[in-house]
Image: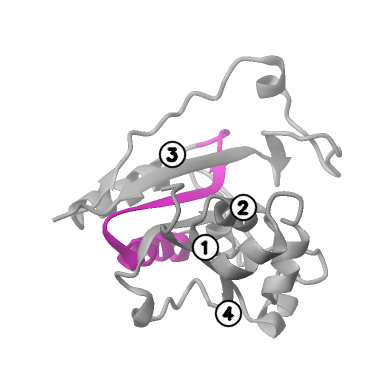
Amino acid sequence: MLECGRIGLGFGCGREPLVGLLAKFGCKVTATDLETEAARQRGWVSTNQHTSSREALYEVASEYVSGNLFDSNVKFQYLDMNAIPDELHDQFDFAWSACALEHLGSLRRGVEFVKNSVRCLKPGGIAVHTTEFNLSSNEETLESLGCSVYRERDIRELIEELREAGFEVAPLNLNTGDGRVDKHVDLPPYGFSPHIKLMLEGFVVTSIGFIIRRPKT
């Protein structure tokens, strides 16, 4: 999908530089985030995890893409991931979210978001979503208004629902790795070095991604 003229939709973009990288490839991107006051109430503004303008998005992407190219390829709008408007359906070659759906209020809300997000794809379009993944248990997990951590069984149920709705989902890769960094679990208050596993409310957590394609016919 990284081709000039492809049209993409990003959910909960916050302060991620990915928007600028996609613009660099010539993709036309609509970046979205929750309305500012609602985001402030959830703590995203004070922790610098929210964006409210295209200019703020460019601040974190300026090292990757020129201002002119960014301005011509990126637009921004407010969007509640729990209420994707119908006018966005069938409009995009690709869609994505990066560890945002676990903050929608419950495990089920995250699932419903994914199912609604793929309705925004054109036939042949691809959605890529990442979320928090529980490595400690397939039974107990964290579920709260602020953060919900998905178990393997939750991910498999989501995949089954997507397939039943006619979407194609790439096979899961559950290999957690055996390198030195793979074996490190960061503990609160967490170090400043990059980590791929951390302890969260008693659970070892990492990220998992899934790739969904809307069939062409």
Farthest top residue in view: 179
- Return the mark for residue 18: 2
Closest to the observer, 55 or 101: 55
The residue that appears at 81% across and 64% down in the rendered structure is: 47
Q: Which residues are magenta?
A: 109-137
Disc 3 and disc 4: Cα gap in Å? 31 Å
Disc 3 and disc 2: Cα gap in Å? 27 Å
In magenta segment, residue 140: no
Disc 1 and disc 2: Cα gap in Å? 9 Å
Mark nearest the camera among 1 and 3 is 1
Disc 1 and disc 3: Cα gap in Å? 25 Å
Farthest bottom residue in view: 37
User: Dot 1: what SS?
Assistant: strand
Q: Amino acid at mark 2?
A: Leu
User: Dot 4: what SS?
Assistant: strand
Quarter residue 198 falls in: top right
Q: Are marks 1 and 3 in contact (CB under 8 Å)?
A: no
Left-right relation of 136 to 217: right
For label 4, the residue is: 78
| Image: 202 above or below 92 | above
For label 3, the residue is: 152
Name which of mark 1 and mark 3 comes first in the sequence.
1
Q: Are marks 4 and 2 in contact (CB under 8 Å)?
A: no
Mark nearest the camera among 4 and 2 is 2
The residue that appears at 61% across and 38% down in the rendered structure is: 206
In magenta segment, residue 125: yes
Name which of mark 1 and mark 4 comes first in the sequence.
1
Farthest left residue in view: 217
